[in-house]
Image: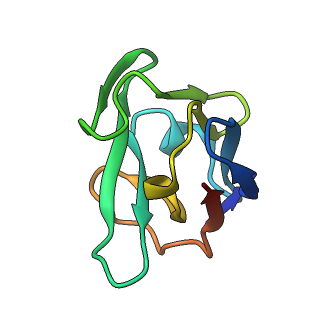
């Protein structure tokens, strides 16, 4: 299962680092997958904000480009999202999943950015 953590209440301009552990997944399944961080704000659809293919090929939504960095540690079966210069519009529940979105969604981690 996917276990997200690291969310918190933070002031605008602050930083957070989110982690997503693919608990129970063997590395031979984790490693070949491309992974993404998604978020869902109240009243809005879930959106993909960052993706990583292989170890270093990354892509970002325009709204987070230059502020968020996605990375992965295959040995730990963990995907990270470093979020800097946070804005109130970043407030959402953050989730990870493969880019195929073929795993059950985790509980997510709440990020709240106050102005």
Q: Is residue 59 above or below residue 87?
A: above
Q: Is residue 110 above or below residue 74?
A: below
Residue depicted at 65% across the width and 67% down the height: 110
Foreground residue among 110 and 114: 114
Check the picture and name the quadrant holding the N terminus.
bottom right
Q: Please give left or right for residue 33 compared with residue 24 in the image.
A: left
Which residue, as the protein is rendered here, is positioned at the far bottom? 43
One can see residue 71 in this view: yes
Check the picture and name the quadrant holding the C terminus.
bottom right
Q: In the image, residue 84 lies at what x, y percent?
A: 59, 30
Q: In the image, residue 50 lies at what x, y percent?
A: 37, 39
Q: Is residue 49 above or below residue 34?
A: below
Q: Please give left or right for residue 101 compared with residue 75 in the image.
A: left
Residue depicted at 61% across the width and 29% down the height: 74
Foreground residue among 66 and 38: 66
Residue depicted at 52% across the width and 62% down the height: 91
Q: In the image, residue 42 lies at what x, y percent?
A: 43, 80
Foreground residue among 2 and 61: 61
Q: In the image, residue 53 lies at what x, y percent?
A: 34, 28
Foreground residue among 61 and 101: 61
Q: Is residue 55 above or below residue 65?
A: above
Q: Quadrant of residue 46?
A: bottom left
Residue depicted at 58% across the width and 72% down the height: 106
């Amino acid at each position: 299962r996917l276990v997200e953590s690291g969310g918190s209440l933070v002031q605008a301009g602050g930083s957070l680092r989110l982690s997503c552990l693919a608990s129970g997944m063997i590395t031979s399944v984790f490693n070949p997958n491309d992974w993404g961080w998604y978020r869902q704000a109240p009243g809005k659809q879930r959106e993909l904000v960052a993706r990583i293919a292989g170890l270093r090929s990354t892509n970002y939504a325009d709204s987070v480009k230059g502020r968020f960095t996605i990375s992965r540690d295959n040995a730990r079966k963990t995907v990270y999202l470093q979020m800097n210069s946070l804005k109130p519009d970043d407030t959402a529940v953050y989730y990870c999943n493969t880019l195929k979105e073929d795993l059950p969604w985790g509980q997510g981690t709440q990020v709240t950015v106050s102005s």
